[in-house]
Image (tube, rainbow, N blue to C red):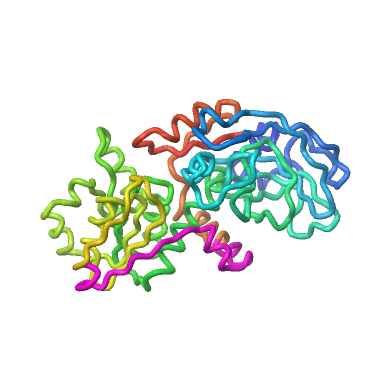
Amino acid sequence: MWACCSLCWARAPAKLRRGLPAAWGSGWPPAAPYSASAEPSLVRALVYGHHGDPTKVVELKNLESAAVGGSGVHVKMLAAPINPSDINMIQGNYGLLPKLPAVGGNEGVGQVVAVGSSVTGVKPGDWVIPANAGLGTWRTEAVFSEEELIGVPSDIPLQSASTLGVNPCTAYRMLMDFEQLQPGDSVIQNASNSGVGQAVIQIAAALGLRTINVVRDRPDIQKLTDRLKKLGAEHVITEEELRKHEMKNLFKDMPWPRLALNCVGGKSSTELLRHLAPGGTMVTYGGMAKQPVIASVSLLIFKDLKLRGFWLSQWKKDHSPGQFKELILTLCELIHQGQLTAPACSEVPLQDYQRAFEASMQPFSSSKQILTM
């Protein structure tokens, strides 16, 4: 039953896949011959020709796939998420904007169907993810150059593979690069139910770090609290609770945080700063509130706090492709060990993209929308 198509194969339990013929891993029925002579085919893709509201400017169109050249890799996309950065890119207010018209999507996982004669790093049947943003993953298939792709193990869950290249990478680097944290140290973050926030909770737990996780109050706050604690969160508090004097009681049995992770800005970021240990660092990687970070002069002077920013695309520019590959494999190992799972996800067929856009832009959304091809 798992051999009906490559997506079904992708969902099959790893133990079952290991017990079946290797050829089934590349889809069934078998794809076209794995050579550079494969004929171009029509591709369904989500395309936008100008910036604006994604629900208004993105269209599902038929494109013609390019032929596989010497260094080309023909990839059948399996799944691709809708991230906040994807929405910002379509709106035209992101730090990296592709030439228009463009295919949306910066993250996802696909399966190699065919490779060119000079390709050595991947082979048909392999799973691959984008090496950099701007690849355009919201499409059924495409031909990419080998250097645009990174191979990942095909025995990790499909949702984990499709959401591997952005949020977990951001979470890991922020935990590792700004403070020399040791097991038992604490970290405080806002937007804790975001994709990055959920990854921070799990990676921090794997590193022996304790987390204070701030979320917006909502009708189902207890349900969210239970879910985050199941991931490894030690404390889950609301923005309103963060502002109360009683917050100091929390630090009677845990150290004040040396690292704060800010994805909101405005008052929320100011409160994070107030709860940092002297000499601590707040790293800003998003601005959901669309308000500036306001830092008290007294905190900067008398507590010597540091304000930093993080953007994964810039980190990639400053590091080699091999270092990014190493980061991806480190995260895959955490997945194999059961220490890192995908964020809460809702899978939506590509043709129902409007529904996925609307859901992804709803307030208090706790489920990442993943387009399936």
**Quarter holding the N terminus?**
top right
Asked whether 313 or 189 is in front, the reply is 313
Q: Is residue 186 magenta?
A: no
Name the residue: 46% across, 49% down. Answer: 341
Residue drawn at x 69%, y 34% is 5
In the rendered image, residue 322, in percent from the top left (x then y), is placed at 63, 67
Disc tally is 0
Q: Position of residue 272 (x, y in %)?
A: 26, 57
Q: Residue at x 18, y 64 (%)?
A: 253
- Residue with the most extreme left position: 245
Q: Main secondary structure of the magenta part?
A: helix
Residue 102, position as x, y percentages in the image: 64, 40
Front position in the image: 65 or 167:
65
Q: Is residue 303 magenta?
A: yes
The stretch in magenta equals 299-327
Quadrant of the snapshot with the C terminus: top right
Residue at the spot 42% in from the left edge and 37% down from the top edge: 367
Q: Is residue 184 visible?
A: no
Of 22 and 356, which appears nearest the observer? 356
Give the quadrant of residue 79: top right
Where residue 114 appears, as percent x and y from the top left, is 79, 46
The image quarter containing residue 344 is top left
Residue 43 located left or right of residue 275? right
Q: Is residue 49 visible?
A: yes
